[in-house]
Image (cartoon, grey):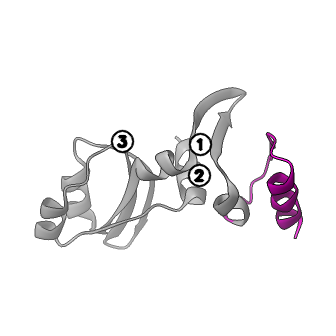
């Protein structure tokens, strides 16, 4: 509700609005630019669409995910039994390699990207 009011106000009178929240999923759709501050230092300041376009998820069997991500920068690793999911940063997607390894490539959620970037 609050975010709808903020957006309505922004549309009527465009301005810079700074929101500080841990509830990224609630506001992800209205963000134009994101800034991530970790331990008092600005680590990311980027257009939201560009940031999301620069990262993707890789999921599948642990050994195969490790093979795919060997020379890539990754954050936000989650493992359950023999299945693993990671977020790849600033890397070019290799759909052919992923397909040959039986992996799934997908879009990253902004909340998970924030957590991955700040947990390193």
Disc number for residue 90: 3
- The residue located at (68%, 35%) in the rendering is 37
Disc number for residue 118: 1
Where residue 28 appears, x then y in whole percent? 65, 60
Disc number for residue 101: none
Which residue is disc 2 drawn over?
115
Where residue 99 appears, x then y in whole percent? 16, 69
How far apart marks 3 and 2 lie (CA) works out to 16 Å
- Residue 31 left/right relative to 63: right
- The residue located at (72%, 27%) in the rendering is 40
Q: Please report contact status of discs 3 and 1: CB closer than 8 Å, yes or no.
A: no
Foreground residue among 29 and 84: 29
- Give the secondary structure at mark 3: loop
Where residue 59 appears, x then y in whole percent? 33, 67
Q: Badge 3: few (under 14), some or many (20 or more) residues near its Cα, within 10 Å?
A: some
Foreground residue among 54 and 16: 16
Q: Badge 2: few (under 14), some or many (20 or more) residues near its Cα, within 10 Å?
A: some
Q: Which residues are magenta?
A: 1-25
Q: Badge 1: few (under 14), some or many (20 or more) residues near its Cα, within 10 Å?
A: some
């Amino acid at each position: 509700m609050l975010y709808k009011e903020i957006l309505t106000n922004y549309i009527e009178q465009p301005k810079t609005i700074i929101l500080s929240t841990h509830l990224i999923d609630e506001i992800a759709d209205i963000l134009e630019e994101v800034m991530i501050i970790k331990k008092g230092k600005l680590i990311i300041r980027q257009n939201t669409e560009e940031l999301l376009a620069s990262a993707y998820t890789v999921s599948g069997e642990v050994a195969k995910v490790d093979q795919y991500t060997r020379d890539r920068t990754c954050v936000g690793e989650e493992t359950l039994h023999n299945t693993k999911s990671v977020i790849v940063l600033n890397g070019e997607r290799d759909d052919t390699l992923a397909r040959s390894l039986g992996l799934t490539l997908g879009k990253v959620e902004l909340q998970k990207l924030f957590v991955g970037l700040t947990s390193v």
